[in-house]
Amino acid sequence: MSTSKLLRVCSLDAENPIDSSLREAFSSLHDRLKPPFPLTIPSPSEYSQLNLALAYGMLTEPHLAKTHLTHLHAIVIDGYNHFTTILINLSNESYPKLLQTPKSQLLWMSSKLVQVAAVKVETLIISLLRQIKGGDFSEPNLWLCAELMSILANNWDWLLEEPLVMKSSLFVFLRLLADHYRLVGRPELDKLKRMEIEFCIRVLRQHFDICLDIGRDLIRILQDLVYVPEFKNVWMDFLSDPGKFGVSVFMDISQLYRTRTPSHYLLLTITPEMETQLRFLLTHVKWGSQKRYQAWFAKKHFCTPGSETLIVDIVRFICCVHHPSNEIIQSNVISRWAIIGWLLKCCKKNYFLANVKLALLYDWLFFDEKVDNIMNIEPAMLLMVNSINQYIDITHTLLEFLFLLVDNYDVQRRELIFKGVSNSFCLLVRKGVVHSLESLTSCNQLSPVFREKLSSMISSSNLKTVKGSSESEIILCGRRTPSGA
């Protein structure tokens, strides 16, 4: 295998189709890439090959990149659609393997495409945002953060025309700031933190009305930054005077609590490579075979300092993004709740463990059947019930945390949260996720206090278990139906 100028490869790697197509186009058209450029309009097939060749030239020949870019400007007939698509595919499928020079050039090219408002450049920027890995303080990861931060900050007018990029960038960098702000003593990181803070505060202060679309997870990540003075001020201002942010004075935080976060935002915190690995684990790996895959995944993603924060993102992904089909649910494939149970065990520090439990139970607090998806709350319920026999500590800690959230997460809106949790239990039984809650309310291994609180909550939601002589009946939100229905 010939040495690639684009990717890190080893002798066992299969030929990369993107690398091959780019290299072959560059090789066949090399002589046409030097000025003076032909004045004839290329045919569609020639145009496609020229885009591939110019992309390869810019990626691997930085000393000639400006010449290649001028050539591209001269021939473009589709708003850069073809060229941008090449870079999107490269980012989605091969970014982790890119050599540093092509990586640098990819970010440079992305910046130039933003400046001309190229077709699909918003998709390219979002693709690059997904390549940033939470909990990773390596130089390459911090470099990517800084490069994207510069592109966004230096192209504010363009950003105003791309609200999805603005909201996506805000979500990503708020999430990263929670990691970055805890580290001190690294000058390059201090500069990056300042850039991130200034960008996020500017978006929140000037365009908070647009950011409301992010939904309840915006509150979750903002609350992780309340120790940062600038964000504490934003939080206090929003609670006291929403009108400062250009939203209705009648806006209440409860409305944001009730807004489910679209899966798009939660997917941003998972790299495409990690998404592929997690979906494989949750789609193809059978019960009994999962441990070696889990060990491989942990070795790859959880071995660096700070990587525990990534578990929060993974749990939100599993609950809110990866919803298996009925065929998978009924098969012998490892269940989502079991993977989350393993992830809880991977947390070594109490602070990170609390954030992971919040990520798992967050949708319970504000659950409304009209807008929320039962699949978001299913894993926590099944994890509690299925852990009773062998891992009662997990059942205990999740119930304890859930009741703590009900009483303390937002005291002023305790009634809303109590209703959300009650609705969750009610729907999970009514839809048959569990046949009843008796396994929890009658479990002697659980604290009597928890059993009493759960029974009280069940009673308030009109969800009670009635024992008959031959079978149980469940009163579900006012309806009586045989157990197992």
Image: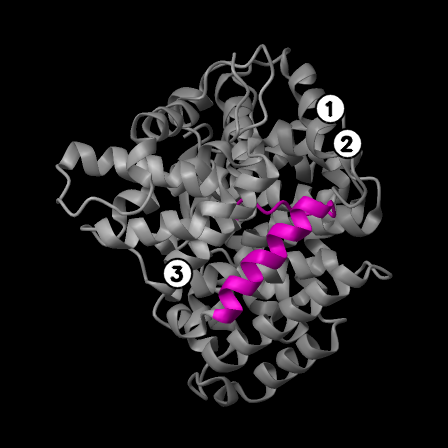
Query: CA–CA distance between discs 1 and 3?
Result: 56 Å
Q: Is residue 426 visible?
A: no
**Residue 459 image point, x, y percent:** 57, 53
Left or right: 338, with 419 as reference point: right
User: Closest to the observer: 365 or 335?
Assistant: 335
Circle 1/circle 3 CB separation < 8 Å: no
**Mark 1 Cα-neighbour bin, 10 Å: few <14, some 14–19, many ≥20:** few
Circle 1/circle 2 CB separation < 8 Å: yes
The residue at the far right in this view is 185
**Residue 163 image point, x, y percent:** 38, 66
Query: CA–CA distance between discs 1 and 2?
Result: 6 Å
**Residue 252 image point, x, y percent:** 50, 79
**Residue 396 image point, x, y percent:** 76, 40
Q: Label 3 is placed on what type of residue?
A: Val
Residue at (52, 37) in percent of width and height:
95
Q: Label 1 is placed on what type of residue?
A: Asn
Q: Is residue 162 visible?
A: yes
- The image's mark for residue 124 is none
Left or right: 40, with 320 as reference point: left
Residue tagged 2:
392
Q: Secondary structure at mark 3?
A: helix
Q: Residues in magenta?
A: 130-154
Residue tagged 1:
389
Residue at (69, 71) in percent of width and height:
194
Residue at (53, 40) in percent of width and height:
102
